[in-house]
Image: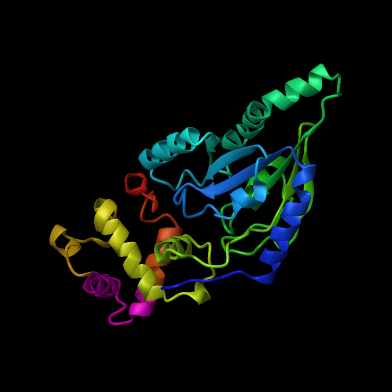
């Protein structure tokens, strides 16, 4: 399954981001804790270059906590300041300002030595669609300042938002890249809702979901669909057929596939991480 999706507004946003970088002190790179690598835009290093960066692993409440700990260490070893958070929780969001000051400690010290009056930190929020940028902005503000939706492409423009006296944020649309060289990356992004569903074959996506859960989270799959140990070792198409029958869909595999994907996104299969640290290439 090859997935390509690069709407016109994303190409425009990429150009605008490059133009606006000179106005910000730091970039907040928002990624999905369930896909710490697959939800990173490979063009971002080229776009951001040497601008200070804070990596935010969002949706940590949905991810496998053991995997999240490993990925936090990975990003720190890459030289990044990193936080795992849940953008809809105030407790998580309140960590961002102190972490930003830590990243910018040298700049803040230089400005103080030069006698410059302290001002709000200016940040740019970057990330692919559906990683929770608008939710993060709304919780920082304590009110709705950005549109949210569990679908890609909600934010279409750029806007400056002020949060108290210490932080100003430039919101940007989610930016994907023109082509996914690795088909598995496309599947992972599709499964978590970063790509519009009408670009996909839902049965292929459901089979991939079953493959992941049979391998890494078999107990969660068994509990949700009342499966036996032997049934977990069935061929994946046969397992999809069995789950379809158990749910009363008979041979409506399209409906069963849609149900599997929806229940995953709703958190009914429990916490999971699709990018496995142990499979990280050297």
Q: x%, y% of residue 204?
A: 36, 73
Residue at x-position 16% and y-position 60%: 228
Q: Is residue 74 magenta?
A: no
The quarter of the picture where the N terminus appears is bottom left
The part of the chain drawn in magenta is: 236-256
Q: x%, y% of residue 137?
A: 68, 46
Residue at x-position 21% and y-position 61%: 227
Left/right of residue 161 with respect to residue 204 in the rendered view = right
Left/right of residue 262 with respect to residue 123 in the rendered view = left
Residue nearest the viewer, comparing 3 with 58: 3
The single residue placed furthest to the bottom in the displayed view is 251
Left/right of residue 65 with respect to residue 118 in the rendered view = left
Q: x%, y% of residue 41?
A: 56, 55
Q: x%, y% of residue 246?
A: 25, 71
Left/right of residue 245 with respect to residue 118 in the rendered view = left
Residue at x-position 53% and y-position 52%: 40
Up-down relation of residue 89 to residue 240 (above or below):
above
Corner quadrant of residue 67 = top left
Evaluate whether residue 142 shows in this view.
Answer: no
Q: Is residue 255 magenta?
A: yes
The quarter of the picture where the C terminus appears is top left
Evaluate whether residue 20 shows in this view.
Answer: yes
Residue at x-position 66% and y-position 47%: 48
């Amino acid at each position: 399954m090859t997935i390509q999706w690069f709407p016109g507004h994303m190409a425009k946003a990429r150009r605008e981001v490059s133009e606006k970088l000179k106005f910000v002190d730091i970039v907040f790179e928002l990624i999905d804790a369930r896909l710490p690598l697959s939800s990173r835009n490979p063009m971002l290093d080229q776009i951001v270059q040497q601008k200070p960066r804070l990596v935010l692993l969002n949706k940590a409440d949905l991810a496998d906590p053991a995997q999240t700990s490993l990925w936090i260490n990975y990003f720190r070893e890459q030289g990044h300041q990193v936080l795992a958070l849940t953008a809809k929780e105030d407790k998580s969001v309140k960590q961002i300002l102190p972490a930003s000051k830590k990243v910018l400690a040298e700049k803040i010290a230089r400005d103080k030595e030069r006698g410059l009056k302290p001002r709000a930190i200016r940040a740019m929020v970057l990330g692919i669609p559906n990683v929770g940028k608008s939710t993060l902005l709304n919780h920082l503000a304590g009110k709705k300042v950005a549109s949210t939706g569990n679908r890609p492409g909600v934010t279409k423009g750029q806007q400056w938002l002020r949060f108290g006296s210490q932080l100003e944020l430039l919101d940007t649309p989610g930016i994907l890249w023109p082509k996914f060289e690795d088909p598995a990356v496309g599947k992972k992004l599709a499964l978590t809702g970063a790509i519009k569903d009408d670009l996909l074959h839902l049965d292929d996506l459901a089979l991939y979901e079953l493959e992941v859960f049979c391998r890494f989270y078999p107990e969660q799959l068994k509990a949700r669909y009342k499966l036996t140990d032997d049934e977990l070792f069935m061929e994946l198409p046969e397992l999809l057929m069995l789950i379809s029958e158990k749910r009363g869909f008979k041979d409506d595999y399209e409906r069963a596939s849609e149900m599997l994907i929806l229940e995953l996104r709703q958190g009914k299969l429990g916490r999971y991480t699709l990018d496995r640290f142990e499979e990280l290439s050297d």
